[in-house]
Image (cartoon, rainbow, N blue to C red):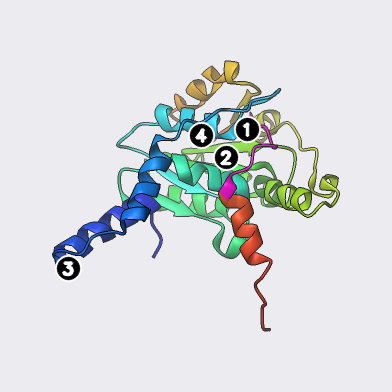
Amino acid sequence: MAADARTAVAALADRLSATTGSRRLDAGLTQKIQDEKQRTVSYEDGDSTDPRRAARYIENALPKDDRILLFDGGHAAMVCTKILTVPRAENWALGWDFGAIGQGLAIAIGACFARPGQRVTHVTADFSFMMNLAEFHTAVRCKLPLTVIVFNDNAVGQEKHDLIHKKLNPSYAEIIEPDFAKLAIGFGAKGFTVRTPDDFGEIDKALAVEEGPVVVDIHINGEVELAASWEIAKHLSNVIFNL
């Protein structure tokens, strides 16, 4: 089943309540969820933008009842799926099944054709976007209503975090990316750049575009890591694949 986690869990909880009568969610789990909702976040922008702050701004800036979201991009997607919401389960999709990043752009383009006349917002990361960058030309050529928001840390973020935890050289995962806003303009689309929270007005300008593809290049602080990110990596390190 593919769905926004919040929407899916809420629907399953309602169905359980309806079918089991007195059955209730575990009290400890319920409290953990409530604590997570109420937790105060201390943002770490540095010389760029904390990805959690950027995701929160996008959540508040996108239209509440008319948004179609398609995620890709390892750690960036983990950040965004915790914050960004959709009004209906069918307005949400994820492009990194089995941890295979780089599929999201093509899926987002497919969503534009599947939902004609509706703008699709594709939230991705720099390395994921670069993996299939040529596909963006299709969006431009077909004048698709596609907004691509790139969380850019000039690295393969999840792998960089893993290397640090394993006390290996993180530079192996660092990649200097091109200027995505200028790249978009070169393709014939519109491009916007966010370097610090002071530039969030550029996100508003991008979301105001009504026709054709748009790219928003958000320079994020790659040092920020979700606790869940390392937990997933630790569990995966213990998995043995039988081929």
| Relative to 48, 168 lies left or right | right
Q: CA distance from mark 3 to mark 4?
A: 37 Å
Query: What kind of element bears circle 4?
Result: helix
Q: Nearer the viewer, residue 158 or 209?
A: 158
Indicate which disc, 1 or 2, sits on the residue closer to the N terminus: 2
Residue ID for mark 3: 20
| Bounds of the magenta segment | 218-227
Q: Which mark is residue 55?
A: 4
Q: CA distance from mark 1 to mark 3?
A: 56 Å
Q: CA distance from mark 2 to mark 4?
A: 25 Å
Check whether the beta carbons of the residues at disc 1 and disc 2 lie within 8 A of each other. yes
Q: Nearer the viewer, residue 236 or 242?
A: 236
Amino acid marked by disc 1: Gly
User: Around disc 4, counting alpha carbons within 10 Å, would you say few (fewer than 14), some (14 to 19), or many (20 or more)?
Assistant: many
Task: Please say if 116 is above or below 231.
Answer: above
Q: Which mark is residue 188?
A: 1
Residue ID for mark 2: 140
Check whether the beta carbons of the residues at disc 2 and disc 3 lie within 8 A of each other. no
The quadrant of the rendering that contains the N terminus is: bottom left
| Relative to 11, 157 lies left or right | right
